[in-house]
Image (tube, rainbow, N blue to C red):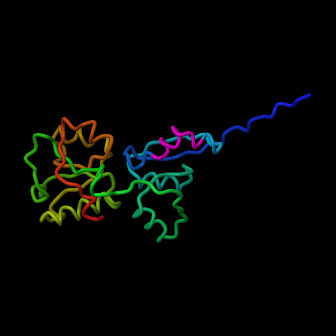
C-alpha cells in the first residue's frame, strides 16, 4: 500500500513594511512565490515609517521589518542585536522615486522658498530627514528656519492640496498616483548620495 506523504504546514512570518516602493520587497517576494517555496506564510503589516517598524522587530512584535541604514546603524551602535538580511531600495540620481513635492498651484520653486514653511518627511532621524536638511542647505536655505515633521507618504498629497504643508517627500506609488495634483521641486536624496 502507498502512504500519502503529508505536506508540512507553512510557517508564519510577520513582516513590517512602509508603503513606499523601496520597501515593497515582501510583496514582490510573495508574488514571485519565494515565500511559498521556502515554506513560509507571510503576514505583511504596514507601518507609518521604518523607525516604528524597526522598533516592532526589536520588541518581538515582528519577525522581520524594513529599516534604513541610519536606523540600523543607530540600533547596532546602541547594542541592539539587529541583522540586515537583504538589501532594499537603491538610490540612483537617474531613477529617483522619492521627490520633494509641492501642490501644483504652489508658488514654491526653490529650497530657499521653504524657509518659514512646513515640510514633511516619513522619518526625522532617518535618511529622509537628513536628505531634506542637506538639500535645503545645498539650495541656500537654513534648515533651522523650516518646520520639518513626520507624516506617512500616503498622507502627503492630501496635506499638500489642503495647504497643511508647503512641501513633502512623496514616494512611489503615491507620487505617480497624485501626479495631477503635485509637482516635484527637488530630489533630496541626491544631496546625500
Which of the 4 image quadrants contains residue 123?
A: bottom left
Toward the right, the furthest residue is 1
Tell me which segment is drawn in magenta: 25-35
Please tell me whether residue 48 belongs to the stretch shown in magenta.
Answer: no
Query: Is residue 89 or residue 165 the one in the foreground?
Result: 89
Identify the residue at horizontal 56%, vertical 41% (top origin). Answer: 42
Identify the residue at horizontal 11%, vertical 56% (top origin). Answer: 110
Please tell me whether residue 30 belongs to the stretch shown in magenta.
Answer: yes
User: Does residue 81 appear to the left or right of 176 in the view shown?
Assistant: right
Identify the residue at horizontal 15%, vertical 65% (top origin). Answer: 142
Q: In x, y percent, where is residue 58?
A: 53, 57
Toward the front, the furthest residue is 94
Toward the left, the furthest residue is 107
Q: In x, y percent, where is residue 147?
A: 19, 56
Name the quarter where the C terminus is drawn.
Answer: bottom left
Residue 126, placed above or below residue 102: below
Query: Is residue 79 or residue 28 the one in the foreground?
Result: 28
Amino acid at each position: 500500500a502507498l502512504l500519502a506523504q503529508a505536506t508540512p504546514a507553512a510557517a508564519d512570518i510577520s513582516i513590517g513594511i512602509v508603503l513606499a516602493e523601496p520597501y515593497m520587497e515582501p510583496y514582490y517576494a510573495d508574488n514571485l512565490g519565494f515565500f511559498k517555496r521556502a515554506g513560509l506564510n507571510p503576514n505583511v503589516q504596514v507601518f507609518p515609517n521604518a523607525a516604528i517598524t524597526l522598533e516592532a522587530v526589536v520588541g518581538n512584535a515582528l519577525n522581520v521589518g524594513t529599516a534604513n541604514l541610519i536606523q540600523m546603524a543607530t540600533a547596532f551602535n546602541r547594542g541592539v542585536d539587529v541583522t540586515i538580511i537583504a538589501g532594499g531600495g537603491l538610490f540612483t540620481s537617474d531613477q529617483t522615486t522619492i521627490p520633494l513635492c509641492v501642490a501644483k498651484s504652489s508658488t514654491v520653486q526653490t529650497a530657499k522658498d521653504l524657509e518659514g514653511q512646513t515640510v514633511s518627511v516619513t522619518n526625522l532621524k532617518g535618511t529622509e530627514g537628513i536628505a531634506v536638511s542637506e538639500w535645503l542647505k545645498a539650495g541656500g536655505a537654513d534648515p533651522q528656519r523650516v518646520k520639518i515633521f513626520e507624516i506617512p507618504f500616503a498622507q502627503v498629497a492630501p496635506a499638500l492640496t489642503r495647504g497643511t504643508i508647503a512641501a513633502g517627500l512623496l514616494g512611489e506609488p503615491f507620487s505617480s498616483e497624485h501626479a495631477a495634483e503635485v509637482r516635484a521641486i527637488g530630489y533630496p536624496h541626491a544631496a546625500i548620495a
